[in-house]
Amino acid sequence: MNPLELDRDRAWLSREELDAAREKLPILYVDAVPVRVDDRGEVTAVGVLLRLDADGRVCRELVSGRVLHHERVRDALLRHIEKDLGPVALPRVPVAPQPFTVAEYFPTPGVTPFHDPRQHAVSLAFVVPVAGDCAPQNDALDLTWLTPQQALDPGIQAEMDRGHGVLLRQALAHLGHSV
């Protein structure tokens, strides 16, 4: 195998190795806000996943996941969008994607608005237009498309887990919506 080929098996840590790394290092993640856009490029809908949290409560989240060793950020975005929204979501991720913000998740609640009880994680957050048919996959129970105004509703925001409501408001502000 030449050095440019990825061996995906070596990219994954064992459960024990990952737990040990999480105790000592921030882990790199990507968060994606899937959006539908009209012909003028205006956001018409925002995709929000329905999941069960670690305690079995139903909550809303954005697409999110780890960047693997030797994986490009763009490839991680595409992998997680396919994992959560399905293989025909048709995300339009630019060749050189630029995050709209960086979110720091801490295991201690209250340090930032973002919380992950497992680890300190640093996440690059992106708005990603999707053009294809999306269907919840993996551990996602449902996918709801909301207008930007609906996404800002306090009831929807209260259902967002781990600070994803804050991230969603930041994405909408980045896109020029009043928050």
Image: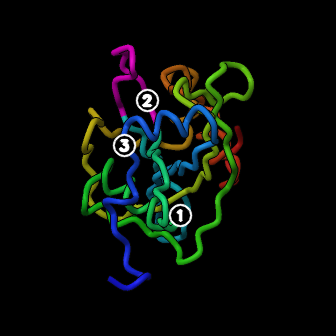
- Front-lying residue, 34 or 38: 34
Whether the residues at callouts 3 and 2 have beta carbons within 8 Å, the answer is no
Whether the residues at callouts 1 and 2 have beta carbons within 8 Å, the answer is no
The span shown in magenta is 50-61
Badge nearest the viewer, 3 or 2: 3
Expressed as whole percent of the image width and height from the top left, the position of residue 119 reads 57, 31
Tell me which label, 3 or 2, sits earlier in the chain.
3
Q: Residue at x 48, y 22 (%)?
A: 159
Question: Which residue type does callout 2 highlight?
Answer: Arg
> Would residue 102 appear left or right of 70 to someone viewing this image?
right
Q: What is the distance, in whole Å, between disc 3 and disc 2 at their CAs?
A: 28 Å
- Front-lying residue, 110 or 47: 110
Above or below for 172 versus 55: below
Check disc 1 and report the residue beneath it: 73
Query: What is the quadrant of the C terminus in the image?
Result: top right
Furthest residue to the right? Answer: 111
Res 14 label: 3
Q: Residue at x 34, y 24 (%)?
A: 52
- Front-lying residue, 113 or 39: 113
> Crowding at label 3, few (<14), some or many (≥20) Cα neighbours within 10 Å?
few
Badge nearest the viewer, 1 or 3: 3
Q: Hey, which quadrant is residue 136 in on the image?
A: top left
Is 58 colored magenta in this rendering? yes
Res 60 label: 2
